[in-house]
Structure formats: structure tokens, C-alpha cells
Image (cartoon, rainbow, N blue to C red):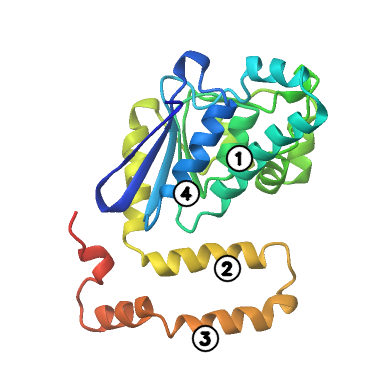
């Protein structure tokens, strides 16, 4: 298995890129396994994405890339489409994706991180958008990386494959928190616990809301945000959450059996 995954308590799933001998580099098998696993994840509260071994993800597998140079354009397009769809599906799942960045990430690894809603990395990790050193471009990951870093920072990192540290990744917004290597699990667990305090229905709706308003001027989305809020008051989560607050008790999504 190129992807190992398990379902933990309270419907939190853990995905492990499982090619440590290849530094968890992406190949077609891993990409397809990721897409299949995402399709099977229904009713999740959160997903934790990480890598086996000491590397998060070294980008695209060089043997796979070599095979692509021998294909017709149509074959290369099909492979690129699989990767693009996997990133799109990971980016748009209706539950939070928490990146457990356990080591270096290059190329496509930064694409995966940029699709995570929350990314926690170890101090020892290093990062690079390394495609141009191979004569390639970071095409399928670019919508997510540029949005995450901003155009100016993306130009700096994409055009010279500059290697940068976890601290700089934090400053750039690629990571949300950097911790000592031996504190990674504790930091990820804190993020999971924070998610578990929140109503799943409201978290999913908030993720949709962010995607809907991002990059649009406030006056353009005024009516849409009013309607979204008005409809939220009709949800069971809203009724339960307000009732629990007024009655000084925990809402049902917190009191679920662990």
C-alpha cells in the first residue's frame, strides 16, 4: 500500500503517505489510492495527513517522471489530470484537513500542505518548490501554492527553487505552527481537540463559506452572506448549540462517546 490510513476515535481519520523508501514521493499508485480513500471517508470530523518515516513528501517520483517523458501527450495529460483531481478533492473535502508535517517537503509536497486547512510542522523540516531544477513547472499545485503564499512569495520560491526553513514557512503562511520535532504529536492533537469542540455541520458550512467569499469584494458577496447566515439559523446544529449554551451543558457533538 502506497497510502496507509486508519480511522481513529470520534471519526478522525489518519492518512500516512507510505513510501518512506522513496521519501513518500508521489506516483500514480499513491495518487489513485489517495483519491479512493477520500471517497470512502464519509462523516469524518477531521483528517490528519502525514508521511511515514522522516520525510513528509519529496514531490513527484523521479521514476514516474521518467516514464512520463516516454508517453504521448495524451498519456501525460491523463496522469496530470489524476494529480490535479486528487489535489482538488483533498482541498474541498467538507471537514478540516490537518497537515502533520513530519519532515522535508518538496514540489508536490508543498501542494499537499497548501490543501491542508491547518498545517503543523517540525523545526527540522525544509521546503522547496524544486520543479524548475528538473526542467519542470509546478503546474497542478500552483492554484493552491500561489493562494497560500501569495503571488510575490510564489514568484520568489517558484522561480529559483530556493530551499527554506520551517520558520520561514511559518512566516510565509505555508505552515501555521512550528514545533520541536518531539512535540509534533502533541501539537496535532491540540488541533484535533479544538476541531472536536465545534459543530461538524457548522465547520463544513464555514469551509464552504471561505471558498465562496475568498478574493471577492464585500459588496459582491453581501447578499450571499446574509442568506447563508439566515439559513444557518434553521440547522439542527444551531438549535442544539444555542440550547446547550443556555442550559449550561455540552452540545451533542462534544458529548459523543470517544
Question: Which part of the image, by quadrant, shows the C terminus?
Answer: bottom left
Judging depth in this view, the residue of 144 and 183 nearest the camera is: 144
Which residue lies under the disc numbered 3?
Answer: 230
- Work out whether mark 1 precedes mark 4 in sequence or the reverse, and give the earlier one: 4
Indicate the position of residue 192 as horizontal and vertical percent values: 35, 49
First in sequence, mark 1 or 3: give its number.
1
Mark 3 to mark 4 CA distance (whole Å): 31 Å
Which numbered disc, 3 or 4, marks the residue closer to the eye?
4
N-terminal label among 3 and 4: 4
Which corner quadrant of the image does residue 166 belong to? top right
| Residue assigned mark 4 | 39
Mark-to-mark CA distance, 2 and 3: 13 Å
Q: Can residue 174 be seen in the rendering of this structure?
A: no
Percent across and percent down for residue 32 are 54, 35
For marks 4 and 2, give the CA distance.
Answer: 22 Å
Report the side of 163 relative to 5 (left or right). Answer: right
- Residue at disc 1, secondary structure: helix
Mark linked to residue 171: 1
Q: Residue at x 62, y 37 (%)?
A: 111
Q: Looking at the image, is 108 positioned above or below residue 228?
A: above
Tell me the crowding category of disc 4: few under 14, some 14 to 19, or many 20 or more residues within 10 angstroms, Cα based.
few
Label 2: which secondary element = helix
Q: Which mark is residue 209?
A: 2
Residue 240, position as x, y percentages in the image: 30, 79
Amino acid at each position: 500500500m502506497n497510502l496507509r490510513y486508519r480511522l481513529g476515535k470520534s471519526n478522525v481519520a489518519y492518512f500516512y503517505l507510505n513510501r518512506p523508501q522513496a521519501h513518500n514521493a508521489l506516483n500514480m499508485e499513491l495518487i489513485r489510492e489517495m483519491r479512493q480513500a477520500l471517497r470512502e471517508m464519509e462523516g469524518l470530523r477531521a483528517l490528519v495527513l502525514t508521511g511515514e518515516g522522516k520525510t513528509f513528501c519529496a514531490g513527484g517520483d523521479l521514476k514516474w517522471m521518467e516514464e512520463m517523458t516516454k508517453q504521448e501527450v495524451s498519456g501525460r495529460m491523463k496522469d496530470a489530470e489524476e494529480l490535479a483531481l486528487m489535489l482538488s478533492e483533498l482541498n474541498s473535502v467538507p471537514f478540516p484537513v490537518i497537515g502533520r508535517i513530519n519532515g522535508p517537503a518538496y514540489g508536490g509536497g508543498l501542494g499537499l500542505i497548501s490543501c491542508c486547512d491547518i498545517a503543523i510542522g517540525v523545526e527540522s523540516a525544509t521546503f522547496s518548490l524544486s520543479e524548475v531544477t528538473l526542467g519542470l513547472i509546478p503546474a497542478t499545485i500552483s492554484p493552491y501554492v500561489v493562494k497560500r503564499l501569495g503571488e510575490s512569495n510564489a514568484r520568489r520560491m517558484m522561480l529559483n527553487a530556493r530551499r527554506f526553513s520551517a520558520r520561514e514557512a511559518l512566516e510565509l503562511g505555508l505552515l501555521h505552527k512550528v514545533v520541536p520535532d518531539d512535540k509534533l504529536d502533541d501539537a496535532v492533537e491540540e488541533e484535533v481537540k479544538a476541531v472536536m469542540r465545534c459543530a461538524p455541520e457548522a465547520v463544513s458550512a464555514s469551509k464552504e463559506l471561505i471558498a465562496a467569499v475568498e478574493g471577492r469584494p464585500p459588496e459582491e458577496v453581501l447578499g450571499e452572506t446574509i442568506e447563508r447566515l439566515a439559513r444557518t439559523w434553521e440547522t439542527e446544529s444551531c438549535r442544539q448549540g444555542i440550547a446547550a449554551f443556555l442550559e449550561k451543558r455540552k452540545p451533542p457533538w462534544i458529548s459523543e462517546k470517544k
